[in-house]
Image (cartoon, grey):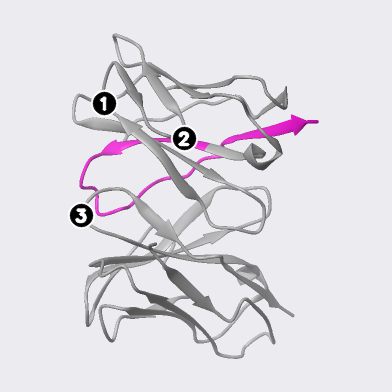
Amino acid sequence: LAKTTQPPSMEAYEGQEVNVSCSHTNIATSEYIYWYRQVPHQGPQFIIQGYKDYVVNEVASLFISADRKLSTLSLPWVSLRDAAVYYCIVTVNYNQGKLIFGQGTKLSIKP
Amino acid sequence: EAAVTQSPRSKVAVTGGKVTLSCHQTNNHDYMYWYRQDTGHGLRLIHYSYVADSTEKGDIPDGYKASRPSQENFSLILELASLSQTAVYFCASSGTENTLYFGAGTRLSVL
């Protein structure tokens, strides 16, 4: 399973667009990229997943570099509710859910 | 809405005592998981199950047992609780892909 590297923390103001990066230089061709987030006192919540190029849903967008070694989670118009720890996970699909959650990126939002 | 319910939400146990954490899901998912999270760290997989009456070891199974009596229910059992098992425990369920639905967690303190 590929190792991931994320910045430990980030800060943003409400209304800004936030981009959280994740480096996965050893990603295998069989691996996908997943993003989860965890707000205090709750379990992690799935945000988005992708394999290559660009993926978008109602919550976020995910850009994956052409060589797939870097991915960026983009959160448009963040609010105080987006303050959370964001986890980037790289693993094979249908991995029976055996996800490895690293340290993540703690996103703080200022009003 | 997918639902994973954990009980109790918090518990104080004595060293050497037996602790049972319960998890119930109404997602009709085959897979269920138990993770633990220590303060300021990511989640680590303890046990998981993909079918009733069967459980599998995760990454840190020592000191824990699991039971899956039905598709909906998955329990984590600490036969002899120890101080090092103080943590927040999360249960999750998923279908065949890596989209996990987590419960709100159980905060366990072993004294």
Q: Is residue A109 magenta?
A: yes
Residue B4 screen position, x and y as percent: 43, 69
Please state which of residues B95 and B82 is positioned toward the viewer in this rendering: B95
Compared to residue A105, the image places residue A16 above or below, namely: above
Name the subunit of mark 1. A
Please state which of residues B23 and B37 is positioned toward the viewer in this rendering: B23
Query: Of the residues shown, which amino acid type is indicated by label 1?
Result: Tyr
Q: Would you name the residue on which mark 2 appears? A: A59
Q: CA distance from mark 1 to mark 2?
A: 18 Å
Query: Of the residues shown, which amino acid type is indicated by label 3?
Result: Thr
Q: CA distance from mark 3 to mark 2?
A: 23 Å
Q: Which residues are magenta?
A: A87-111
Which of labels 1 and 2 is toward the front? Answer: 2
Q: Would you name the residue on which mark 3 appears? A: B96
Q: Which mark is residue A51?
A: 1
Name the subunit of mark 2. A
